[in-house]
Amino acid sequence: MITGRCLCGAVEYRSPGPALFSVVCHCRDCQRASGSSGVPVLGVPRSSFTCLGPARQSRTAGGSGQMAVRNFCGQCGSMLFGTPEAAPEMVTIYAGSLDDPEAFKPTDALFVAHRPAWARLSVPLVEHEGLPAGPRVVQS
């Protein structure tokens, strides 16, 4: 079971898992949304995802041309999960909101051309200049 919540506990979520993918996205949108070098994110099927509490949304145009929808707590502002219009079948969970941070096991780094030099991780990841071809991985 994948579970998480915001900083103040007003919004919680859960998904039976397992994660479809686990990546660190360094696109400029994720950098600006998080105020950091990127967003560690894992994907789960939307059909089995449950949100408990009053999540609010921000919507911006994503790289696909469709809306990137970020869900956050209206009380404390914690970023929780994404519901990207480009991938309506999935939810992208922001790893910082996980109850068990060890559940996040990244395999890939996306948009590494935008990653600051100081943001390299010590774990070996497959690196991509943008979105990889093959199995669907969607930026949050």
Image: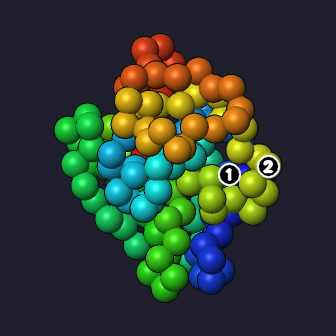
Q: Is residue 92 above or below residue 110?
A: below
**Amino acid bearing label 1:** Ser
Residue 31: horizontal and vertical position, in percent? 40, 52
* Callout 1 crowding tier (Cα within 10 Å): few <14, some 14–19, many ≥20: many
Residue 37: horizontal and vertical position, in percent? 47, 49
Question: Which residue is under mark 1?
Answer: 15
Q: Which mark is residue 102?
A: 2
Q: Residue at x 70, y 35 (%)?
A: 122
Instruction: Say whether marks 2 and 1 touch (CB < 8 Å).
Output: no
| Secondary structure at numbered mark 2 | helix
**Residue 48 or residue 69, whichever sits in front:** 69
Q: Is residue 117 above or below residue 92?
A: above
In the displayed structure, does residue 88 sit left or right of residue 104?
A: left
**Amino acid bearing label 2:** Glu
Q: Is residue 58 above or below residue 19?
A: below
Can residue 39 be seen in the rendering of this structure? yes
